[in-house]
């Protein structure tokens, strides 16, 4: 008998017969057909060979001394290692009872002696093929189950299979580790009782999935661990159905306490950044006021001087006899107008240095820009060419914080005035506002000043970048941060005709 590596054979066939002649005939019949042939002349040997080689087909003589074919078959079937081989009985006993007994013991087929070689060949071929396919199928199944188990093991979310009453029929390892117990302890528990205590069921998450087949996805649900401590969970439940019948639910859940912690930390950090930005903006407004103080003093001084002149005139008028009442009243009117002018300047300063009411409101940009223009012109040193405002078309209200928008506009206008002064021109600074699209208003501040430094693109919005002797370099970075916080955009362009255009956008108020 030539021994080749098993893999080169289509199948292994074990021939069992106590009669050497029969064995020889069987052997001759099946040799050279691609089978690995094994022979045994008694039951004990047959079992040993079968265990070692796991033949696909066993041709088994029934009438043998010591152990007959039935017993061999029974023991083959009882051993998991040999159970799947196809047992084909060979016997001269051609009676029905013998056949039935063979089949009832797990035999696959029956060949009557004396056998026809063609019949043996055909049956062995068929059974070998069936067993081989079955083995392949099982190997494939095992692999799939292994894959599935590996996937379920690697998933960090807890997974439960629940029946319609909420009993846990399946749990993955992650579920056990989240809950803090061993996997077998979970199976059989009632999901609702185990994780939510024995309170009444109504209102419990996942209940409607089990009872009405409604998928749910909830975040921040408080679930109970085995030690009865609570944890916030994200729970997703999908109904499990077969046809119309609701069989329960598949529940995926995970512990989100860390996630919630970092969300809270992020939120706190956001609030801190927001507060710091507001504080910085406020400090910067105070600084701007400081820089403009000389201008304000001048601006307030003018009406005060005028008032004291008019008072002198009025005193003279009431000292005269007769008193010209009309002239006195006209002079008092002028005093009132001048005091109004002075208090206007102070009102504006107050409005500008106050801390803004946090939150957005509907802002009338045209009015706000006009106010800002008057404010900027107070800075007497910058008054050379003046400031022109152009509003194109109807401007809807924007959703913004008016104090902060004004601060941005003032910063840009003052930069433009400074650049204009540097360039020694009298070209006015232009402020344009236009509805860019349905949802955005664009504001531009244009000058014909000295233009931007070469490295502007990389530097301009960086804190403390300045080209001015007395500059601080916080104006533009602050503008950027304020505009971004309003949901707008800020940028600049070099004007081909010389000078610079700074622009920013603001969202149109939703009601507008
Ligand atoms: N309109 C402008 N024209 C030319 N350069 C400008 C203009 N606006 C800003 N810059 C440049 O950007 C720099 C930073 O501006 P800013 O942040 O307002 O700080 P500062 O005005 O204190 O220098 C300025 O020093 C200047 O070089
Ligand atoms: Mg500036």
Image (cartoon, rainbow, N blue to C red):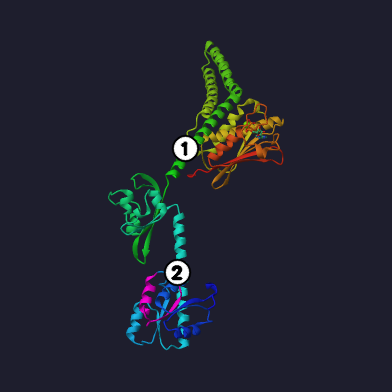
Q: Position of residue 397 (x, y in %)?
A: 52, 41
Disc on res. 324? none
Q: Position of residue 453 (x, y in %)?
A: 70, 36
Camera-side mark, 2 or 1: 2
Residue at x-position 54% and y-position 26%:
349
Residue at mark 2: 138
Relative to 201, is 14 on the left or the right?
right
508 versus 84 height, above or below: above
Indicate whether residue 348 is drawn in magenta: no
Q: Position of residue 409 (x, y in %)?
A: 59, 35
Label located before the other in sequence (2 or 1): 2
Residue at mark 1: 268
| Distance Cα–Cα, label 2 vs label 1 | 57 Å
In this rendering, does residue 203 appear at all? no
Taking depth in this image into account, of 371 and 166 the one nearest to the observer is 166
Count residues near mark 1 (Cα–Cα under 10 Å), then give few for <14, some for 14-19, many for 20+: few
Taking depth in this image into account, of 500 and 295 the one nearest to the observer is 500
The quadrant of the rendered image in which ligand 1 is seen is: top right
* Label 1 residue SS: helix
Quarter location, residue 138: bottom left
Count residues near mark 2 (Cα–Cα under 10 Å), then give few for <14, some for 14-19, many for 20+: few
Highlighted range, magenta:
54-79
Quarter location, residue 474: top right
Q: Position of residue 455 (x, y in %)?
A: 69, 38
489 versus 188 height, above or below: above
């Amino acid at each position: 008998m030539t021994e080749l590596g098993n893999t080169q054979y289509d199948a292994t066939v074990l021939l069992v017969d106590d009669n050497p002649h029969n064995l020889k005939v069987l052997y001759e019949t099946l040799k050279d057909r691609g089978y690995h042939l094994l022979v045994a002349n008694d039951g004990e040997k047959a079992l040993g060979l079968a265990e070692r080689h796991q033949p696909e087909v066993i041709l088994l003589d029934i009438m043998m001394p010591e152990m007959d074919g039935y017993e061999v078959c029974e023991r083959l079937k009882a051993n998991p290692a040999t159970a799947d081989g196809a047992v084909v009985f060979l016997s001269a006993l051609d009676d029905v009872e013998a056949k039935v007994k063979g089949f009832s013991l797990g035999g696959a087929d029956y060949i009557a002696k004396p056998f026809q070689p063609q019949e043996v060949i055909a049956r062995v071929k068929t059974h070998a093929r069936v067993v081989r396919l079955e083995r392949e199928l099982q190997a494939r199944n095992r692999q799939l189950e292994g894959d599935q188990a590996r996937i379920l093991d690697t998933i960090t979310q807890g997974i439960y299979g629940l029946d319609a009453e909420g009993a846990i029929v399946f749990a993955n390892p992650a579920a056990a580790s989240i809950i803090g117990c061993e996997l077998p302890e979970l199976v059989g528990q009632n999901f609702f009782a185990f994780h939510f205590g024995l309170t009444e069921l109504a209102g419990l998450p996942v209940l409607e999935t089990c009872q009405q087949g409604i998928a749910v996805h909830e975040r921040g649900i408080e679930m109970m661990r085995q030690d009865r401590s609570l944890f916030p969970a994200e729970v997703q439940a999908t109904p499990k159905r077969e046809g119309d019948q609701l069989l329960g639910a598949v529940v995926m859940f995970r512990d989100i306490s860390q996630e919630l912690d970092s969300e809270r930390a992020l939120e706190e950090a956001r609030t801190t950044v927001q507060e710091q930005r507001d504080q910085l903006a406020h400090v910067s407004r105070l600084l701007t006021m400081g820089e403009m103080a000389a201008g304000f003093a001048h601006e307030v001084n003018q009406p005060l001087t005028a008032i004291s002149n008019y008072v002198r005139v009025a005193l003279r008028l009431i000292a005269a006899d007769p008193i010209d009442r009309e002239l006195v009243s006209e002079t008092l009117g002028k005093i009132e107008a001048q005091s109004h002018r002075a208090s206007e300047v102070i009102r504006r300063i107050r409005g500008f240095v106050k801390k803004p009411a946090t939150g957005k409101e509907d802002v009338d940009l045209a009015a706000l820009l006009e106010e800002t223009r008057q404010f900027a012109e107070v800075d007497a040193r910058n008054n050379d060419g003046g400031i022109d405002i152009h509003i194109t078309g109807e401007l809807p209200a924007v959703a913004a914080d008016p104090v902060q928008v004004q601060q941005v506009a003032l910063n840009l206008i003052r930069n433009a005035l400074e650049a204009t002064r540097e360039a020694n021109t009298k070209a006015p600074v232009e402020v344009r506002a236009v509805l860019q699209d349905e949802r955005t208003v664009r504001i531009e501040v244009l000058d014909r000043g000295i233009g931007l430094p070469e490295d502007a693109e990389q530097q301009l919005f960086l804190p403390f970048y300045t080209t001015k002797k007395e500059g601080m370099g916080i104006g533009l970075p602050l503008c950027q941060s304020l505009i971004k916080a309003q949901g707008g955009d800020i940028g600049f362009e070099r004007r081909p005709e010389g000078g610079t255009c700074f622009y920013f956008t603001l969202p149109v108020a939703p009601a507008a």
